[in-house]
Amino acid sequence: EAGVAQSPRYKIIEKRQSVAFWCNPISGHATLYWYQQILGQGPKLLIQFQNNGVVDDSQLPKDRFSAERLKGVDSTLKIQPAKLEDSAVYLCASSFVRDTGELFFGEGSRLTVL
Amino acid sequence: GENVEQHPSTLSVQEGDSAVIKCTYSDSASNYFPWYKQELGKGPQLIIDIRSNVGEKKDQRIAVTLNKTAKHFSLHITETQPEDSAVYFCAASTSSQGNLIFGKGTKLSVKP
């Protein structure tokens, strides 16, 4: 079974520029998550989707971050404008069961903001 | 909200020795406690989990214990091997939230 696919794997931009990350979850997984992992820390949830609806976006910096999952499958996370502190790995995960189910993570997209 | 503390931040052991990583959580409503292993350049991968109605769970060389009264849980790896070297994260969640709060991670190094 194919895993969670993410692209791009690496991205370097200057502050105030914009960037977008793409995620394709495991087939059949209704729940999709975007996590931010800053170097040396554990992943922190940014947003959680159930099908194409938002379940939790309480920790998403909405003045600069946006995410969508229009058809309940693929998802895109956008940052505009980027700040230096946005440098991190952005992990996408999916799960079959919404509550307390195993999360399957992609390999992540590493963002460096200069 | 939930807060998860993890110790130690780094752990170095000789091959064949045991390794123990400890976590504490703050929200008494948390009822699901997974452990994830993250290798360099990869996403975290679930290695074992435990729910609040169980005190201990074992899977080959890996075991997890949970003390709900003290609000702490631990990962035990026996007979460590070099391929166990990675960063390990504990996490906690409540069924009402559905999302995981991760600890800061423990970098385990197993020396051959």
Image (tube, grey):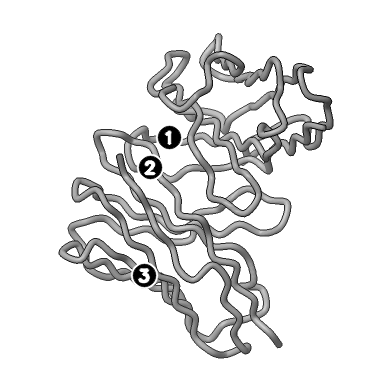
Three-letter amino acid code of the residue under disc 3 = Ser
Three-letter amino acid code of the residue under disc 2 = Gly
Could you say which quadrant of the image residue B95 lies in? top left
Q: How many C-alpha atoms fall within 10 Å of the one at disc 1: few (<14), some, or many (≥20)?
A: some
For residue A7, side relative to residue A86 (left or right)? right
Residue where numbered disc 1 is placed: A96
Q: Chain of mark 1?
A: A
The answer to whether mark 1 and mark 2 are in CB contact below 8 A is yes
Residue where numbered disc 3 is placed: B74
A64 relative to B32, above or below: above
Give the CA separation, mark 3 to mark 1: 26 Å
The answer to whether mark 3 and mark 1 are in CB contact below 8 A is no
Indicate which label's residue lies in the foreground, 1 or 2. 2
Q: Which corner quadrant holds the C terminus of chain A?
A: top right
Q: Residue at x 78, y 24 (%)?
A: A15
Residue A47: x %, y % from top left: 48, 26
As helix, strand or loop, the secondary structure at mark 2 comes to loop
Q: Residue at x 53, y 59 (%)?
A: B105
B73 relative to A3, above or below: below
Task: Compare marks 1 and 2 and give the one earlier in the sequence.
Answer: 1
Residue where numbered disc 2 is placed: A101
